[in-house]
């Protein structure tokens, strides 16, 4: 069972190429001005063109208007839209229908009740869910804060909609995180941003490689135990 690996917040074509060469399945481009990983459209197009056809290209937006989405999709060959704000379920559905791209809805969680509420609200409208830690009170952005959450809160997940695990993952902890959740219904893979950086917005090639290696090892060991 191979798990998807999404490397989010790439800011250069070289970083994207390194991530793909290391085995990433998805890359994320951030279109949120408050993030240190935010990219302009021309920059995003250059990054995407460097890896187009080799990887899924996800555009991350926070409460975007339709013009913002249309402009990005016209310039950048996105394969997915990720919504990381307070978008309502109907808005998620409208965006997916309007642009014809799969939508990933990111949701901050801190309890089993949060997970249940997220599934109930968005499961029928998003193509995939992404569970992240709720941002701390001081945070200026909804994700990419390097904060973990207790994955035990996912233990009762229904998993009718595929989902990714995010929130404070690093090369050192992702193996154990996956080991704790990969038997759960709907689990598809992991998402990382700050956990593989040497500085905000600067991905470290070795950390990316080590992270992906740990993900693959966790999946392989799970298969061996299940055999």
Image (cartoon, rainbow, N blue to C red):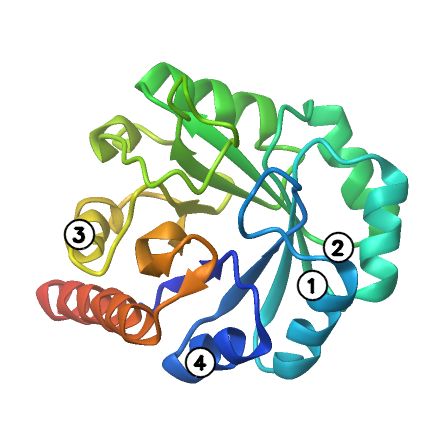
Q: Residue 39's image quarter?
A: bottom right
Q: Nearer the viewer, mark 4 or mark 2?
A: 4
Kindly check if marks 4 and 2 are in contact, taking CB atoms under 8 A apart as contact. Answer: no
Q: Position of residue 197 (x, y in %)?
A: 35, 59
**Sequence order check, earlier mark of 4 and 2:** 4
Q: Is residue 127 above or below residue 15?
A: above
**Which quadrant, please, contains the C terminus?**
bottom left
Q: Secondary structure at mark 3?
A: loop
Q: CA distance from mark 4 to mark 1?
A: 19 Å
Residue at image mark 4:
18
Q: Secondary structure at mark 4?
A: helix
Kindly check if marks 2 and 1 are in contact, taking CB atoms under 8 A apart as contact. Answer: yes
Residue at image mark 1:
79
**Sequence order check, earlier mark of 4 and 1:** 4
Q: Nearer the viewer, mark 1 or mark 3?
A: 3
On the question of residue 53 being in view, the answer is no
Which residue: 14% across, 51% down?
176
**Sequence order check, earlier mark of 4 and 3:** 4
Kindly check if marks 2 and 3 are in contact, taking CB atoms under 8 A apart as contact. Answer: no
């Amino acid at each position: 069972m191979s798990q998807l690996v999404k490397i989010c917040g790439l800011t250069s074509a070289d970083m994207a190429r390194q991530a793909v060469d290391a085995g990433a399945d998805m890359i994320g481009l951030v279109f949120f001005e408050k993030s240190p990983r935010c990219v302009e459209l021309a920059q995003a197009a250059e990054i995407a063109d460097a890896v187009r056809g080799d990887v899924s290209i996800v555009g991350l937006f926070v409460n975007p208007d339709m013009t913002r989405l249309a402009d990005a999709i016209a310039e950048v060959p996105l394969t997915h839209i990720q919504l990381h704000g307070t978008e309502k379920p109907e808005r998620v559905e409208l965006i997916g229908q309007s642009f014809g791209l799969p939508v990933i809805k990111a949701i901050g969680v801190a309890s089993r009740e949060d997970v249940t509420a997220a599934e109930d609200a968005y499961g029928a409208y998003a193509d995939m869910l992404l569970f992240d830690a709720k941002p701390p009170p001081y945070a200026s952005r909804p994700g990419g804060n390097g904060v973990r959450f207790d994955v035990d809160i996912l233990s009762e997940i229904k998993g009718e909609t595929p989902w990714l695990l995010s929130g404070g993952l690093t090369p050192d902890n992702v193996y154990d995180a996956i080991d704790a959740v990969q038997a759960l219904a709907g689990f598809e893979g992991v998402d990382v941003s700050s956990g593989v950086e040497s500085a905000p917005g600067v991905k470290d090639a070795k950390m990316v490689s080590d992270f992906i290696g740990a993900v693959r090892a966790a999946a392989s060991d799970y298969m061996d135990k299940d055999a």
